[in-house]
Amino acid sequence: MTLRLTVAQALVRFLARQYTERDGQRQRLIEGCFGIFGHGNVAGVAQALLQAHETGEADLRYYLARNEQAMVHASVGFARMRNRLQAFACTASIGPGSTNMITGAALATINRIPVLLLPSDFFATRAASPVLQELEDPRSYDVSVNDAFKPVSRYWDRISRPEQLPSALLAAMRVLTDPAETGAVTLALPQDVQAEAHDWPDNLFTERTWFVPRPLPEPAALNRAVEVLRGARRPLVIAGGGVIYSEAGQALRRLAEATGIPVSDTQAGKGALAWDHPCAVGGVGATGSPVANALAREADVVLGVGTRYSDFTTASRTAFADPGVRFVNLNVAAFDAGKHAGVSLVADARAGLEALTQALSGYHADEAYTARAQERQARWRPVVEQAYHLGHQPLPAQTEVLGALNEFMDTRDVVVQAAGSMPGDLQMLWRARDPKQYHVEYGYSCMGYEIAGGLGAKLADPGREVFVLVGDGSYLMMATEIVTAVSERIKLNIVLVQNQGFGSIGSLSESVGSQRFGTSYRYRDPATGMLDGGVLPVDLAANAASLGADVLRTRTIEEFRAALARSRASDRTTVVYIETDPLAPVPSSESWWDVPVSETSALESTQKARAAYEAAKRGQRLYL
Ligand SMILES: Cc1ncc(C[n+]2csc(CCOP(=O)(O)OP(=O)(O)O)c2C)c(N)n1
Ligand SMILES: [Mg+2]
């Protein structure tokens, strides 16, 4: 039997019939489709989505986004919240609509989060070339702007003929659902091919289940890992995002309780172990807590679980100072498991942690070391309390805003952030109580992820309140999805933190001797010729209101707390606006981040920073 459908109709029909299954739980793989239509997809994919809806033949709900980059972010927010078991498709018109998705694709791939991208493409027949928005490469008619998706996609294909679709779809689903390979998957769809009819074998459209594996560690590799761990006196766990995606929080807790090994976390892993568990020592690395960083300096064995060891995690390879430090890396991806010449334990995080706990029976970390960890943690708590309740004047400190939010949030509420000074303050100070509470995108740290990612997170779990934290810089880059949230009646709580520019890059600039040059949003001062004049007459709260959100303006932390309560009680997307002092003090992580400083300079500030840089760089090592 065959079925006569267009390529786009076949695609939609296929996507609506894909499922994933893990631990006996089955769910739709492709939950819906974000999109923005143009001439590249309005007659193809759009027609197919409409027909699917009208006839009830394929259930793939369409969500109209306001920016193509943002719709990929929303898809990532969704898939991350669903632990990578479910994803969205994104359809875009040819040219700029498609290339707008490239940043989102990079973000998805770097964070190892699945998303199916469907950029539209030039005519396969070349009948009307060059079509509006076609890139003409004089060296080859085979090149289009969609080739730029290749380095940021884990699978990339162009469907130039209908016959190519089935195998491309199977490959795409395999990559999306493989925890070691997943990321952005791109199927470029030429405009004419989308609308072309073909006779499809009907078994292309039978329901298909993609089993998401929990690979077990190879026994010999487990032995090697256990041998190193048993020899450890001062071991430290680094819990990464893989622990959360694998739902391995309990397995991690059991390992920690059985062995006494302190557990630090990364931006993606925070919340894997609740902040107040006796073994939890907080964030590690450049923006981590001084507790975890002190332990990292001492550690003789680092057990990395589901982490890709970003430079923030390793403090640019200065975090681990023991000359003989060794790594054991439990990761579903061999690529990550092999890092820092570690003992590679390729396995699912949960299965691997369970196997390790069993094999480590009777082992316990050095008592004096674990006691030191707890003492340090006890001394750190009042520092966090103080940062949460600084009473900074006249404008509050950002740490007070974060503190008030942390104290206000319920265990199941979610905080979403991505870029600026907040990820650092959050990693150091946030007290996460639930594995899905802390949603900070710090693989790509992409300004503009916040609101869009929050939209996706809320879509994934409407039962949770989502609190988006967004700086003024990020807000200005991409506030567009407020409109999508309003039209879909998806309720977000958005905390808009106004500090008149780039608080983060401002302080980084100062630390590298660049004197906060060009990092605040100010008038150009005719006297200095620099952007250090008066404050701009920009009202982001009014902007948010104009996009359809309810807005609560607050000036003090007390007003801020009251506004949070009102926002929670409302069923409408609400923006809570607060101004903060970008120069307010923040506790030190007692760590470092490698940002090279000019080796030669006419500025004294730069020369000083260079001397400090050279001194810090001496702590950097290759872990071989
Ligand atoms: C898309 C993008 N462009 C540039 C950067 C570099 N960058 C990191 S933080 C930042 C400033 C963020 O400003 P804001 O959102 O106001 O946060 P703040 O630093 O004030 O906390 C910039 C420009 C980035 N991370 N993402
Ligand atoms: Mg700012």
Image (tube, rainbow, N blue to C red):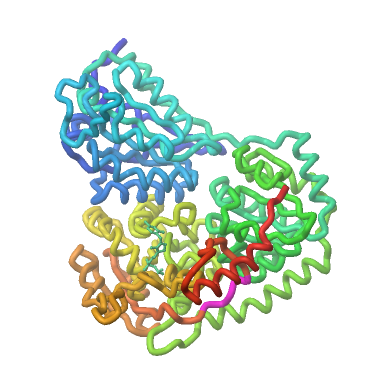
Question: Does 385 sit left or right of 235 as displayed?
Answer: left
Which sits in the foreground, 2 or 153? Answer: 153
Which sits in the foreground, 246 or 316? Answer: 316
Question: Does 597 sit left or right of 614 as displayed?
Answer: left
- Asked if 102 appears above or below 420 in the picture, the reply is above
Residue 74 location (% of width, % of height): 35, 50
Quarter holding the N terminus is top left
**Res 531 quadrant in image:** bottom left
Label total for image: 0
Residue 278 location (% of width, % of height): 69, 67
Q: Residue at x 61, y 62 (%)?
A: 285
Q: Main secondary structure of the magenta part?
A: loop
Which sits in the foreground, 360 or 115? Answer: 115
Question: Does 29 sit left or right of 141 as displayed?
Answer: right
Q: Residue at x 49, y 72 (%)?
A: 513
- Asked if 37 appears above or below 121 in the picture, the reply is below
Whether residue 501 appears in magenta in the rendering, the answer is no
Question: Does 378 sit left or right of 414 as displayed?
Answer: right
**Res 288 quadrant in image:** bottom right
Residue 128 location (% of width, % of height): 14, 24
Whether residue 589 appears in magenta in the rendering, the answer is yes
Residue 235 in view, yes or no: yes
- Asked if 498 appears above or below 238 in the picture, the reply is below
Q: Residue at x 49, y 38 (%)?
A: 182
Which sits in the foreground, 31 or 230? Answer: 230
Q: Residue at x 29, y 24 (%)?
A: 140
Q: Which residues are magenta?
A: 586-590
Residue 55 in view, yes or no: no
